[in-house]
Image (tube, rainbow, N blue to C red):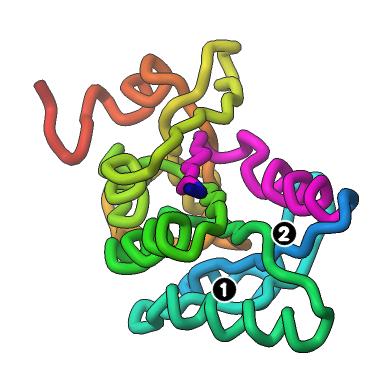
Amino acid sequence: MAKLYFRYGAMNSGKSTAMLQAAYNYEERGHRVLLAKPSIDTKGDMAILSRLGVTRQVDFLLAPETDAASAFQEHRQNTLSQTGLGVSALLVDEAQFLTAAHVDDLLRIAIIQNVPVLAYGIRTDFQTVAFPGSRRLLEVAHSLEELKTICRCGRKAVFNGRKIGGFFVFDGDQVAIDGAQVTYESLCGACYLEESNGVLNGRTH
């Protein structure tokens, strides 16, 4: 039986780079993979953008209403008819933006269709609250792996601080795509609490 993997880390922990490397490793050995990401991630449109400068187009997007299992099966059949090759794995970027239903579909793909699914994303938002997709992946994934990065102070970063105009903010919508106005910085717990004046999820102790 294939497995559902969740590989998570704070911002700048190399998740997209690791995913593209995994895809390359499969293909270097003659296997075909499919790549997907949630449609809410508008950065790069249909592309996955690694901070190291590596980019690659995804095979399909997952809108909130999309049946992920059906979308995968459709692209799997297209791949087989066009190349004569089966699909050896499904790789999903920005998995935190998936719905819980998407994640359940990914689990079904792994178990019922016997295709490994590798999902990459972050656990929590800038207020330390779990994203719906990440929460469900933590609940049902067969394998959890943390991809590590460091805070500015040198400790392991675990939180994602949001900046607007270069200043940290701790309220607002859960989703704000990294771009010209909004940026993120990976922080350890101590630095996060220092910047937030001790506030976690809108609450002080």
Does residue 111 lie above or below 156 as drawn? below
Q: Which residue is mark 2?
A: 49
List x then y, in percent, for residue 130: 29, 45
Query: Is 2 or 74 nearer to us in this picture?
Result: 2
- What's under tag 1, amino acid-wise? Thr
Identify residue for label 1.
42
- 10 Å crowding of disc 2: few (<14), some (14-19), many (20+): some
Q: Name the quarter where the C terminus is drawn.
A: top left
Q: What residue appears at the point 45 percent right and 35 percent down from the top-left corner?
A: 143
Seen from the viewer's position, the closer of residues 129 and 60 is 60
Q: Is residue 106 placed above or below 122 in the rendered structure?
A: below
Does the magenta segment cover residue 95? no
Can residue 113 be seen? yes
Mark 2 and mark 1: Cα distance apart in space: 11 Å
Using the rendered image of the protein, determine whether residue 98 is visible from the camera's viewpoint: no
Which label's residue is closer to the chain start, 2 or 1? 1
Q: Above or below — where is 108 with respect to 59? A: above
- Find the magenta span and give its range: 3-27
Give me the residue at 34% from left, 83% from top: 65
Whole-percent x and y of residue 112? Answer: 41, 62
